[in-house]
Image: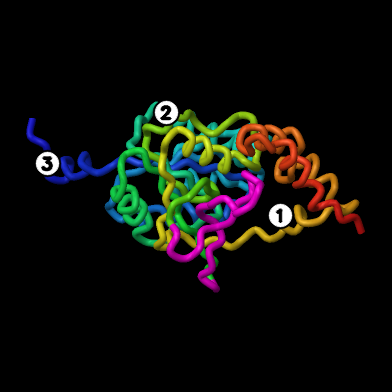
């Protein structure tokens, strides 16, 4: 049987599984998914695997109506980011795509974003992960992207890349393109984390496994910085103490202990305690 020109063209394009998770952010989620088509713009074929973590705002129903091709997976309501992305990834693996794309449900991809990500990937070898640079829609300042280690004793203190830098030690998980080989070489994101650290941990594990992580310097998405969470983690007060020590979005001692033990080297215990010492300014 002879393939039509359009069929042959589609089969020559890479297939991307877009992995997402959401909870009660219907309008943001719909906007993020609505932007994917123009972001792909013929550079690939794709399918969205989205975990709706038991939203009560009609997210699944709206997605089913507006984007019926979305593969919606229902969550338990306690998955948070890392658990939701694990479930999305596990659901996508049987489809055997060429790439996986982590995408936050509040990250709005720009037109031709996927072409930029694939171009960055092809500049290196197959064991390359590409981080998409997200910028503030008003200022153009980088809000999420790749990280490098800060100079100093700590092995778990990171900063965003500066202008001209592109190689990363790890990354935010807002927009990241992975070759399918990472599943067999590294696995998926760890079940030991609920919300925080899952993306940073995966990047550090990938580097340890010999993968290169590079940031696509062309901005590929717009996203405002979540300053509310940063403010709650900045100072230890009676009001913030419960959030810091018990919330999956805080600095839970069990998860932070494992992260330091896995990635901070011989001084891991110092790094563990120093994080809390820095925020122990009680007012």
As helix, strand or loop, the secondary structure at mark 3 comes to loop
Q: Which residue position holds label 3?
A: 4
Give residue 21's position: percent from left, percent from top.
55, 42
Part of the protein shown in magenta: 138-165
| C-alpha span from label 1 to label 2 | 33 Å
Disc 1/disc 3 C-alpha distance (Å):
52 Å
Among numbered discs 1 and 2, the one appearing first in the sequence? 2
Q: Nearer the viewer, mark 1 or mark 2?
A: 2
Q: Position of residue 190 (x, y in %)?
A: 58, 31
The residue sitting at the left extreme is 2
Q: Between 219 and 152, which is closer to the camera in this rendering?
A: 152
Mark 3: give few (<14), some (14-19) or many (20+) Cα within 10 Å. few
Q: Position of residue 264 (x, y in %)?
A: 64, 39
Q: At 66% from the left edge and 46% from the top edge, which residue is drawn?
A: 154
- In this rendering, would 18 be left or right of 193? left
Query: What is the secondary structure assignment of the residue under circle 1?
Result: helix
Q: Which residue is mark 1?
A: 229
In the orientation shown, which residue stands out farthest toward the bottom? 139
Residue 9 picture quarter:
top left
- Callout 2 touching callout 3 (CB < 8 Å): no
Q: Earlier in the sequence, mark 2 or mark 3?
A: 3
Magenta region, mostly helix, strand or loop? Answer: loop
Task: Please name the residue that numbered disc 2 is placed on.
Answer: 185
- In the rendered image, which quarter contains the C terminus? bottom right
Q: Quadrant of the N terminus?
A: top left
Label 1 packing within 10 angstroms: few (<14), some (14-19), many (20+): few
Question: What SS does tag 2 mark?
Answer: helix
Q: Of the two numbered discs 1 and 3 on the same chain, state the one appearing first in sequence.
A: 3
Mark 2 or 3: the one toward you: 2
192 versus 178 height, above or below: above
Residue plotted at (90% across, 55% down) = 282
Whole-percent x and y of residue 197? 62, 41
């Amino acid at each position: 049987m002879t393939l039509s020109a359009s069929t042959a063209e589609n089969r020559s394009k890479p297939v991307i599984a877009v992995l997402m998770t959401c909870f009660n952010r219907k309008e943001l989620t719909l906007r993020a998914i609505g932007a994917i088509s123009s972001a792909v713009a013929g550079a690939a074929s794709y399918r969205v695997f989205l975990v709706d973590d038991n939203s009560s705002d009609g997210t699944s129903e709206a997605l089913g109506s507006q984007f019926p091709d979305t593969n919606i997976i229902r969550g338990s309501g306690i998955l948070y980011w890392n658990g939701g992305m694990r479930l999305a990834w596990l659901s996508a693996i049987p489809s055997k795509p060429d790439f996986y794309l982590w995408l936050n449900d509040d990250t709005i991809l720009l037109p031709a974003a996927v072409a930029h990500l694939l171009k960055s990937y092809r500049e290196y070898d197959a064991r390359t992960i590409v981080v998409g640079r997200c910028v503030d829609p008003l200022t153009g300042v980088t809000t999420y992207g790749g990280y490098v280690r800060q100079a100093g004793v700590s092995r778990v203190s990171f900063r965003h890349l500066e202008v001209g830098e592109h190689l990363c030690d790890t990354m935010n998980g807002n927009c990241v393109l992975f070759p399918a080989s990472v599943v067999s070489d590294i696995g998926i994101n760890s079940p030991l984390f609920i919300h925080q650290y899952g993306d940073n941990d995966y990047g550090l594990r990938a580097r340890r496994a010999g993968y290169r992580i590079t940031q696509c310097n062309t901005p590929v998405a717009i996203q405002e910085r979540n300053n509310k969470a940063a403010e709650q983690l900045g100072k230890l007060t009676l009001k913030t103490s419960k959030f810091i020590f018990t919330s999956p979005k805080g600095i839970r001692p069990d998860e932070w202990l494992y992260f330091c033990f896995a990635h901070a080297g011989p001084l891991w215990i110092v790094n563990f305690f120093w994080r809390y010492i820095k925020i122990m300014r009680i007012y």
